[in-house]
Amino acid sequence: MNADLMPFLRRMDLNLLVTFDVLMRTGSATEAAQLLNKTQPGVSRDLSRLREIFSDPLLVWNHGHFQPTERALELHPTVREALSTLEAAFRPPESFNPAHASGVVNIGLGAHLETVLAGPLLRILAQKAPDVIPRLHPVHGAFDPDQIDNKQLDIAIGLFRNIPKRINAEVLFSDTRVAVMSKNHPLAHRAEIELQHLMEYRFFAFSNMFQQRTNFDEALKRTGFQLPFSAYLSGFGITGYVLEESDYVTTMPYVAAQAHIRHFNLIHRQLPPALQPVTFYMIWPRRLESDPLVNWVITLLKEVTAQEVTNTGTR
């Protein structure tokens, strides 16, 4: 066997990597010390050794918490994955029972999916995991990795693009984007809407996307058309009320349109082919790969989504 096999790893104390992982996840030497059952000076010594080994500050104190450097962000997914693999290999076999689970799971839902998934998700969680608290967050527009890196979200579903490799991503389902409006809207008499028709009516987006490009903007840009929004709403929840009481139009995935139409006097119409395709991704951080509760919720979200997509006949 080669005597130089893994020379760098032989110089590394595994406990230093555990400290690094906890510091990355907490951003606090005090909290890390509590979790690791160490003193705060002990954690600081570990960090000093890590900085020396990697020739990088790794974590810089900024406004009351540690801010990771680019090198730390690059290292952490690999370190976390390696530690998770070792932990899973060494841990005695055990089965996860959602009925005994507790805690908060932060779930981001984009593009009107909260309208589709929130009801069935909360119903099933109340039945199977009554002590688990789902905290739902609206997700607008392009993917923001800070929401995952800063632990604002544990799981997110949306029309994401340019997802960093350090974040797990899986295609959840594909759908067709449609235009939604009141049944009394002038566009309602058309079976299909052409690009020039879009320019004749008022569309709204959501306040988080003010002065930002939406996924619809990106699709429209490829056609050579532009569509300025005439209003910005506070959130997805008031969409049906606004459409029913105004001459505005908006676009959304077919599965979401069907959910709105069940409860409001609305109608959907097909958009030009170039604007139709939408693909939803589910994303979650590698730091939670070994978290049994998060993994169970991920599986549950897949099942709930598949059921709702099947029920609406999403195309």
Image (tube, grey):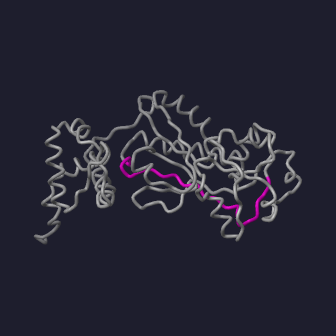
Q: Which span of residues is magenta-colored?
A: 269-289
Quarter of the image with the N terminus in it: bottom left
Number of numbered discs present?
A: 0
Furthest toward the left, the residue is 3
Relative to 124, does residue 57 appear above or below in the rendering?
below
* Horizontal and vertical percent position of residue 46: 16, 49
- Residue drawn at the location 57% of the way across and 50% of the way down: 140
Residue found at the far right of this picture: 189
Q: Residue at x 23, y 38 (%)?
A: 30
Is residue 199 on the magenta stretch? no
Q: Quadrant of residue 159?
A: bottom right
User: Residue 138 location, x and y as percent?
Assistant: 56, 44
Residue at the spot 14% in from the left edge and 54% down from the top edge: 49
Measuring from the top left, give residue 125's x and y in whole percent: 53, 33
> Is 314 above or below relative to 261?
below
In the picture, measured across the screen, residue 133 lies left or right of residue 258, that is left
| Residue 285 is one of the magenta-drawn residues | yes
Horizontally, residue 296 falls left or right of residue 49, namely right
**Residue at the location (77% across, 38% down)?**
264
